[in-house]
Amino acid sequence: MSDTAVADRARILVSCPDRPGVVAAISQFLYGMNANIVRMDQYSTDPDGGRLFMRVEFDLPHLSDRRRELEEGFARTARPLDMQGEIRYARERKRIAIFVSKMDHCLRELLWQWQAGDLSGDPVVVISNHPDLREVAATFGLPFYHVPVTRETKAEAERRQLEILKNYRVDLVVLARYMQILSTEFVSAYPNRIINIHHSFLPAFVGANPYERAYERGVKLIGATAHYVTANLDEGPIIEQDVQRVNHRDSVEDLKRIGRHIERVVLARAVAWHLEDRILTYKNKTVVFV
Amino acid sequence: MSDTAVADRARILVSCPDRPGVVAAISQFLYGMNANIVRMDQYSTDPDGGRLFMRVEFDLPHLSDRRRELEEGFARTARPLDMQGEIRYARERKRIAIFVSKMDHCLRELLWQWQAGDLSGDPVVVISNHPDLREVAATFGLPFYHVPVTRETKAEAERRQLEILKNYRVDLVVLARYMQILSTEFVSAYPNRIINIHHSFLPAFVGANPYERAYERGVKLIGATAHYVTANLDEGPIIEQDVQRVNHRDSVEDLKRIGRHIERVVLARAVAWHLEDRILTYKNKTVVFV
Amino acid sequence: MSDTAVADRARILVSCPDRPGVVAAISQFLYGMNANIVRMDQYSTDPDGGRLFMRVEFDLPHLSDRRRELEEGFARTARPLDMQGEIRYARERKRIAIFVSKMDHCLRELLWQWQAGDLSGDPVVVISNHPDLREVAATFGLPFYHVPVTRETKAEAERRQLEILKNYRVDLVVLARYMQILSTEFVSAYPNRIINIHHSFLPAFVGANPYERAYERGVKLIGATAHYVTANLDEGPIIEQDVQRVNHRDSVEDLKRIGRHIERVVLARAVAWHLEDRILTYKNKTVVFV
Amino acid sequence: MSDTAVADRARILVSCPDRPGVVAAISQFLYGMNANIVRMDQYSTDPDGGRLFMRVEFDLPHLSDRRRELEEGFARTARPLDMQGEIRYARERKRIAIFVSKMDHCLRELLWQWQAGDLSGDPVVVISNHPDLREVAATFGLPFYHVPVTRETKAEAERRQLEILKNYRVDLVVLARYMQILSTEFVSAYPNRIINIHHSFLPAFVGANPYERAYERGVKLIGATAHYVTANLDEGPIIEQDVQRVNHRDSVEDLKRIGRHIERVVLARAVAWHLEDRILTYKNKTVVFV
């Protein structure tokens, strides 16, 4: 899209009790603003008294001058229908921190897609508990912070990390094969804003060494799972999963190599969807409007 | 769904010039009727002055008593916005004629899914240019008409077929590996209501003997294509396609066997979508809201 | 293949300590018999001192007159190399018992592929703990035994089932959504000759109600697993797995419907491979030469 | 594998008239050398008098001292059976020239996989008709040659390119979205040693602008094809193909973006297989032992 087009584009995300009139109220409101709906997606958990989720993407001419009008109007529309909603502006690109350890494939895929113009957000900082990937970050012109983590220094390290996130005004944290478990405190600072890539088709092989265990079990497909991070390890809402076929000839090393490919694809998809405000969550599940 | 649920469900399909207010008008109208929107899908070919397609699925309490009210109200809503639209009632299950020749796999898949309750329409008659599959039809309690076709008798045969379709009040014709080309006259009697399964990934291997040609060319995937039939053979709007991996060990016979599997899957998906009013067409393409 | 071709075809399956000379010994032996190798597959768990698996498919002119010569020659070849091996004759089609409960999709898929000539074995009997599918069996001309199973009668029921298997000289038992757990005694009577279809991507959702649990967990793919049955429920060697994409709109009922499709495909593949002697097992894993 | 392991590993590729004794002869010969067969694949186009293809991967202790013995022995074995065969040594890593124009995704994927240790060959030079990707090559420490091509200078440019290939002792040419057609002379200098990635599922959309045409035709899957380059454009033996699902929402730009992903995956697979000597060709088709 051209810059002008981006400047006028916004999205409304809504979650509310399902009842007649929700769609009408939102679309009437937008029509009254003279906005043009580009795409509208709606999902009801249960037509008879469940919860309704909606995403409306629209163009509003001269949006930058009309944000206050838009926000106040939306608040008035949302209140009587108990909507929890947010307006997101395409021009406000999300700022991303990428956490890594030693493996570079997920980091590279994200940076590469960013460079190719395929991401509608911007990596702004790379944080790692190891120094190894400093140069990769440098190649893409990104600052790199080496924050070592040991059992003893973990609390202090997380304080340091949160400080960096704050300094860089980070909107989204991506754990791109970051081999550390985050504390509940850390996670709660970025609810539904930390995406992890787990190297298995969850809930199969929850926990450590999934490829070794997949090999032992003799599975015929291996997979990867991108999910939001919650206090319960490997239990957060799943955003995306994919698998690839393997066979008896594949060693653990082969599974890891094949897995690297799935991991980067799955993580990149999840990150792209988050950046485009396509994901809503409820009951530890995601609604993804793709 | 329960019978009551089905009785109250309807869908509005709309195609119109894209302009602000279309979504608002439809949703406001439905809200005024006290309908509950179950699902709304919308697609604009081009946000700046293209064409808008919309499908709204909704429940309207006591629908059977309010059809006239619904239809008149929708007509009033549609007119000022140049909408071409239709209301479809879930309770009015579409009536299907299945055309076959000698191969039974597509026929069986459809009848089987029907029997399993997976289709929201009903096969009512099987028509064939060969007598071979009479018994299959009989097993499922369906009338079977053997209408032989030769070059000389083709016009007469089509008259006979159209008569049968009329007698059975057929809404949808499915060519389930019917190895005859229909005349332009026949096709124009059922616009966008004849679905064919072509045994290749169109536009690769247009025409006859696609598996032989796929074998000769040494392709690594073979596929199938379900499309609406138009006057131009193999050129109608594509509804669904899928492929499966093959390799050098697969003979032409193997490709055909593998192909049979893809064909029945792809055809059954396309038929199900048609029956659920999920498909709109424009410019020889389909919009499929799945 | 023609009947003559089938009459002359055999397969040797070998498992032995990996050492130089195994392939040479087998191929030299077959050459000495004037057999023509149609296909040879070989797999070593570890080139440095692991285990070697081999499958050789060959044509031996006038095979029926030379079986004793073949078997004795093979025994002489196998002994010095510590081979565990078997000769299987394509003409000796395996006899299959299909166990079902109430769901018919896996049964129908198998019978249908059999009828289409796609299986190189023959269902000879259907056994069920419910009477519901008697007619399906009858349609395909198969005897149907209703053997009810309760906690109290289980031992007796299994005795009855084993008797039926013996009477019909069954080579392979297929659990086509048979919702009963077999005893260790039963399983040990048919080692690596009982194939089960589990309705999840094992080891995810081991146990009961996998679709409900997949729905709760919000997975984005659902799958099915065909495996040999061992004494440990859901833990036997995996033969084949596949998955299909689902999303937040899919209810538990949808997952089950989609699942039915994957289940029948995955089970039919596993059965076909078993019938063609393509599967060897070791360490609770399978080697599948496809 | 360790360096020692690589040093002792070799592969024999054979193509010959299919007759009894071929497998026995090769395996007997290798056994006589005290080689250990790691993997053997064999394919006969037709068991009754067709052509046989074989790939044997083996470890021969102290291989570097025994190459002459191996080669002479193999020649003696091959002659009486009319084998066309070659011995390839794992330690002799193939040297790759990558041709590009302006798009970098295929180049990056190859270089990245190389850097990750996933390729068993080595890019040694990048050649382009545009200067744009010089820096990418530099990042990976590779020399970059800008050889502009116009209709008038094409012959001269190809001479220059061939000279570069010779200077760098190139074994394999990869056209990684190189948007120029090579002359018959050029192609014949590297028979079955030039791999191209075509941005469609061939033979669909042969020729220029495949994504635009896929969009116009409304296909539901888009694909990519890696093939050896022959004198007939887009007609060479297909090595690998894959597809990805698209829908009506995807613009031509989206198709290109999605296509970039498939292209790099498909090309990288084909290149890896070539480097591991897994591909044989006949009758404009490939036998790929994966």
Image: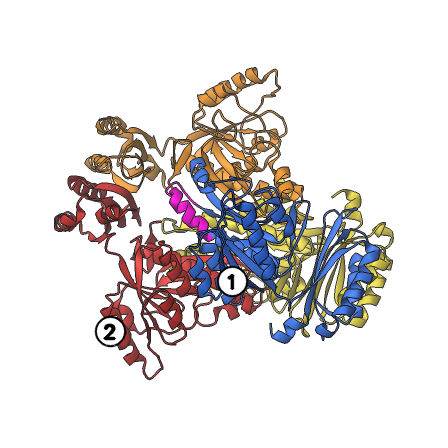
Chain colours: A blue, B yellow, C orange, D red
Comparing C53 with A161, the one in front is A161
Horizontal side of residue D166 vs B248, given as left or right: left
Query: Could you tell me residue D242's position as x and y percent?
Result: 45, 57
Three-letter residue code for mark 2: Glu
Query: Could you tell me residue A174's position as x and y percent?
Result: 55, 54
Per the image, the residue denoted by label 2 is D163
Horizontal side of residue B125 vs D27, given as left or right: right
Query: Could you tell me residue A89's position as x and y percent?
Result: 67, 66
For residue B174: magenta? no
Horizontal side of residue B1 vs A133, given as left or right: right
Q: CA distance from mark 2 to mark 1?
A: 36 Å
Range covered by the magenta-colored residues: A246-261
Can you see residue C187? yes
Residue D190: mark in rendering: none
Q: Chain of mark 1?
A: D
Q: State the predominant SS element of the stretch in magenta.
A: helix
Per the image, the residue denoted by label 1 is D258
Q: How many marks?
A: 2
